[in-house]
Image (spheres, rainbow, N blue to C red):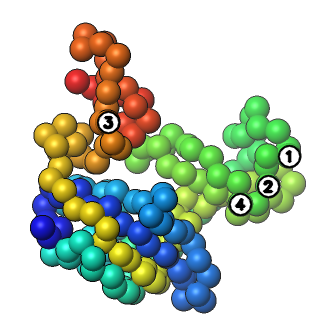
């Protein structure tokens, strides 16, 4: 079986930046599952995985435009500290991340720096502008279930179970609400 549209692939991988620093990993004990064609992973990696089979082991270099995009200075802004009302000073440090409601939906923002009552925030993805180096091993491929296709992502073993057919189905993979 090959990785094609609506196949769920199980991967082990190591992700590094240009400096060789490990940014992320998934291994046999904590593998990564994704459904091909659903947009659940970066474009460059999904393209590289097309038509791969179980046992394929490869290295791929993905430029920013096929990963998290280039950095965009328009996504940085200086805002007043008062916008973080209720956040303790100990949590207000460079590198801290928060979810913010914006005109484009919920975004993760990172505190770039703090200067007195001014907080400099950055809504770029932390890996924006980075060339990504993946070492990938394909360990399993299966057909996605109808439920996974409807939800647009794979479910862990056991799926979106519920304690009763009449109750709303929930699990963590669907933000607590897989629907039913």
Q: CA distance from mark 3 to mark 4?
A: 36 Å
* Picture disc at residue 90: 1
Q: CA distance from mark 4 to mark 1?
A: 12 Å
Is 63 drawn above or below residue 69 in the view shown?
below
Dot 2: what SS? loop
Residue 128, image x and y in percent?
50, 72
Local crowd size for mark 4, using a 10 Å CA cut-off: few (<14), some (14–19), many (≥20) = some
Residue marked by disc 2: 93
Q: CA distance from mark 4 to mark 2?
A: 6 Å
Residue marked by disc 4: 95
Residue 93, image x and y in percent?
79, 55
Quadrant into which the N terminus falls:
bottom left
- Cβ–Cβ under 8 Å for marks 4 and 1: no
In this view of the protein, can residue 25 be seen by the observer? Answer: yes
Is 179 drawn above or below residue 117 in the view shown?
above
- Cβ–Cβ under 8 Å for marks 4 and 2: yes
What residue sits 58% from the left and 87% below the top? 20
- Cβ–Cβ under 8 Å for marks 3 and 2: no
What residue sits 17% from the left and 49% below the top? 144
The first of marks 3 and 2 along the sequence is 2
Q: CA distance from mark 3 to mark 2?
A: 40 Å
4 displayed left or right of 151: left
70 displayed left or right of 55: right
Residue 4, image x and y in percent?
13, 66
The first of marks 4 and 1 along the sequence is 1
Is 63 drawn above or below residue 42 in the view shown?
below
Residue marked by disc 3: 158
Residue 173, image x and y in percent?
39, 40
């Amino acid at each position: 079986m090959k990785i094609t549209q609506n196949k769920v692939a199980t991967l082990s991988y190591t992700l590094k930046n240009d400096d060789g620093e490990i940014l992320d990993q998934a291994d046999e004990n904590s593998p990564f599952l994704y459904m091909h064609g659903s947009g659940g992973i970066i474009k460059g990696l999904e393209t590289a995985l097309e038509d791969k089979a179980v046992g394929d082991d490869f290295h791929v270099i993905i430029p920013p435009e096929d990963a998290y995009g280039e950095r965009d200075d328009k996504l940085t802004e200086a805002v007043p500290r008062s916008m973080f009302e209720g956040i303790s000073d100990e949590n207000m440090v460079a590198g801290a991340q928060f979810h913010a409601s914006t005109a484009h939906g919920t975004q993760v923002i990172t505190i770039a720096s703090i200067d007195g009552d001014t907080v400099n925030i950055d809504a770029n993805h932390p890996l924006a502008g980075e060339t990504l180096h993946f070492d990938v091993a394909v360990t399993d491929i299966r057909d996605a279930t109808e439920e996974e296709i409807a939800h647009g992502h794979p479910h862990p073993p056991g799926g979106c179970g519920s304690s009763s057919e009449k109750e709303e189905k929930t699990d963590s993979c669907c933000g607590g609400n897989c629907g039913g």
